[in-house]
Image: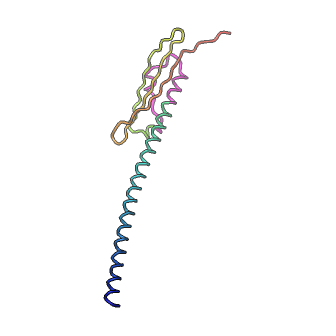
Amino acid sequence: MSATERHSSATRLGFTVIEVSLALTVLLAASILLTQFLVASSQQRKLADQRRLALEELSNRLERVMAAKWEDVNVAAIEGQEFSPAVQENLPAAKLLASITDEPGGSTSGKRVRLEISWEQHGQRVSPIRLTGWKFPHREVLP
């Protein structure tokens, strides 16, 4: 093998090592970006599941309020109920706030019931989920 052939062979070998190094660098960067995407996606899915669970809890509570007797609709009764086991397990430091305001309306006066639930994620309170309903006294219909 002549000196020219050896020089040419060494140049190609060096070029190949540079190509491989560059390809590995690109692959490493792509895998880091993919990992970050998967982590962010997982966190967003968890938050979406928590929000769905919070909305279900509020919906169930509001449904119980609507089924309750007129006299039994008060803040203490609503906030005094325990959270469902799913909420206790998946919504850390969950907090429920209820407010009831009288809605004047002549012969159809009612109560506006507003429920709000919030919880903590990564040490910060999540934006609360709110649900509002109106309760009217039951009136008998005469034939």
Q: Is residue 77 magenta?
A: yes
- Colour scheme in use: rainbow
> Magenta span covers which residues?
59-86
Residue 8 vs 73, above or below: the answer is: below
Residue lying farthest bottom? 1
Residue 143 vs 93, above or below: the answer is: above
Q: Return the x and y of residue 119 as percentages of the image width and height.
A: 39, 36
* Residue 45 relative to residue 15: left or right: right
**What residue sits 41% from the left and 27% below the top?**
97
Nearest the viewer among 11 and 55 is 11
Q: Return the x and y of residue 20 as percentages of the image width and height.
A: 37, 71
**What residue sits 45% from the left and 33% below the top?**
83
Q: Where is the C terminus found, in terms of image quarters?
A: top right
Q: Return the x and y of residue 124 as percentages of the image width and height.
A: 34, 38
Q: Dominant secondary structure of the magenta stretch? A: helix
Q: Where is the N terminus found, in terms of image quarters?
A: bottom left
